[in-house]
Amino acid sequence: MSEFRFEITAQDGAARTGVVHTPRGEIRTPAFMPVGTAATVKAMLPQSVRATGADILLGNTYHLMLRPGAERIARQGGLHRFMNWERPILTDSGGFQVMSLSSLRKITEEGVRFQSHIDGHAEFLSPERAMEIQRLLGSDIQMVLDECPALPAEKSALEKSLALSMRWAERSRRAFGEQPGRACFGIVQGGTHADLRQRSAHQLREIGFDGYAVGGLAVGEPQAVMFETLDATVPHLPSERPRYLMGVGKPDDIVGAVLRGIDMFDCVLPTRSGRNGQAFTWDGPLNLKNARHAEDPAPLDPECRCPACRQFSRAYLYHVVKANEIIASMLLTWHNLTFFQDLMAGLRRAITGDDTQAFAASILSRYRREGGA
Amino acid sequence: MSEFRFEITAQDGAARTGVVHTPRGEIRTPAFMPVGTAATVKAMLPQSVRATGADILLGNTYHLMLRPGAERIARQGGLHRFMNWERPILTDSGGFQVMSLSSLRKITEEGVRFQSHIDGHAEFLSPERAMEIQRLLGSDIQMVLDECPALPAEKSALEKSLALSMRWAERSRRAFGEQPGRACFGIVQGGTHADLRQRSAHQLREIGFDGYAVGGLAVGEPQAVMFETLDATVPHLPSERPRYLMGVGKPDDIVGAVLRGIDMFDCVLPTRSGRNGQAFTWDGPLNLKNARHAEDPAPLDPECRCPACRQFSRAYLYHVVKANEIIASMLLTWHNLTFFQDLMAGLRRAITGDDTQAFAASILSRYRREGGA
């Protein structure tokens, strides 16, 4: 079995492009990982996700542990085979969803007790169990369990939470053990405090991980604050390991983070927006519920290669969105994932061509974050 | 432009196989038409519908007139272009859905007034307007407007309703006029009364249509009664024209109707069942919500060529059905449409090979109408 290995092929300022080599295939970076929460990227067949250009998916430990269960998936030969995606999969540790979705949470040194949001069943997640679940799933990149404190929070509370997360990171790393060809990533926490972020980064390096994630951002803070936090954090991460900004983000967030040296991203935005009638374009998001599209025979984006743009008009998309037809979710999800993958491909080309600043400027000059109608 | 023409290539008893030639392509008969109610076969892309083997779709005049509207579709270049299905489309006249979906119906000699089930808007459908809508949609096979009486009904009421439907059939045929390459089908009514069915058939032949449908069946009567009614009706239809049994049906209904000389079918069963966790198999329908599938690594049907069977296990299908994931609707719809098309292909081969009785017997001996669990 080949090794998990990160190869940087070009750098342009802080931005870099390369390949994460895994036994299940290569991940071209900067990479966007579509979210396949419950063993499916919603409204997409796996081969269609691949056709958009995705090299890797993200799976959610929290959802999969509750339904259908990690042991059941293991008995089915693992998550890849179960969901028919043979390429790499990264799984989160469940920590974030426990905080955002479950009820009756009780956090102790040992772990977190909570109730399933599906059936109210009592559940328990510790660093050891989070890693065991990810191993049962057969995940290629496994994330440590961290505590995700609700914001805003006092610095002293963040500091205490960070200390717990760092102890959990060490236990997670130990529980991961040695899994040839698979990787374990640490997660930097510390809110928007530069000193806490740096402390977190150094503590994680002490433990030693195959990659380093930045967590706890894009949770409501202004973009400028997120970028400042990245500026204060990324230089303290080892340059030879992949860096992953969790849960990000909007296209302009991604561009700014790539400029700051981030290699990997995941976000529900393209899939969730697609199910809600929103389409991403180079000019910003477009709301297909808007009546101005009702009679427009033009494609969503004449240059896009996805089926929504190649086979249908805006008038058709408006109709199926308004009529709540499943094909609306299918087409707009496909389009949005294509858009995000094309953005990543453009960034990779620009970095290789030493043209990153100009490319980023051209994207950002045109892109309106709040979108048209 | 080529003509609309029906060619019978083989007969075996009352069953026949052939080709309906249209300018938009050939329809192999016996044919099953997937239902594309609101300009989409729910949960399917058009190329996927084609991949199942469908030669023709059905569109619903009632739904399309309400949303997005026939004139709007005409301005978009017609229904084929709008929904990206360039092969033949048959449209119903809206009569059946007015009866089953709308409220505050008032039927007069002129037509039917009703309220839209979407927004309560007042609408009117006459034979002339039903044909105008179908012409605006660009439908290849257009159906006359008929009255669909609620059953059970007194024979005298059915007789009165039939007389109105026959006057509407004549007005519909006149409104259709001459549309080269397109066809207008009449609809035989008369409940389960052989004499009314025969009267209806003869009156329609007097008017003269390109094809003849049998309406008002599969509305709750036992299968034996439906077959008796077909036995009493089909011999009175011209043998050289296609015969279409509307809204049918279950696989064993289709087999029995083909044996009785029916050429065309449509039904929401494969698509609607697919969205409800039900899969058709040669042994009968299968309910994928049943916990016995939860750990079953076997495919739904090892011999089926659809993605649900080739790429996933029953355990996976159980999981996505239980989790209400869109991919469950996508995969089970694809499977069910494949099943129905494979059934039709088998019937066509059997008729060509003079083997229809044996083929039908082998299908029916195995197929359990109410299905397993």
Image (cartoon, coloured by chain):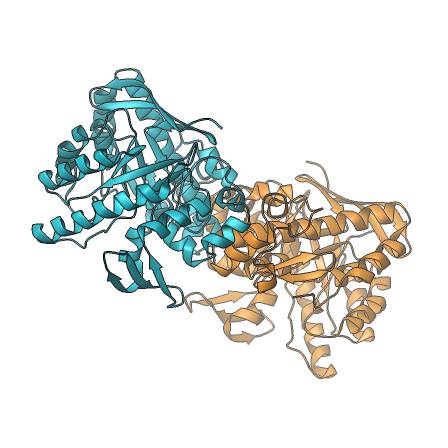
Chain colours: A orange, B cyan
Residue for point 77% across, 51% down:
A30
Choose top left, top right, bottom left or bottom right for residue B338. top left
Name the image quarter holding the N terminus of chain A.
top right
- From what the image shows, is residue B236 above or below residue A254? above
Choose top left, top right, bottom left or bottom right for residue B227. top left
| Residue A3 visible in rendering | yes
Choose top left, top right, bottom left or bottom right for residue A310. top right
Residue A155 coordinates in the image, percent (x, y)? 74, 82
| Residue B316 visible in rendering | no
Direction from residue B173 to residue B52 in the image, left or right: right
Residue for point 72% across, 60% down:
A186
Residue A129 coordinates in the image, percent (x, y)? 56, 59
Q: Could you say which is closer to the camera, residue A63 or residue B199?
A: B199
Residue A351 coordinates in the image, percent (x, y)? 86, 49
Name the image quarter holding the C terminus of chain A.
bottom right
Direction from residue A247 to residue B39 in the image, left or right: left
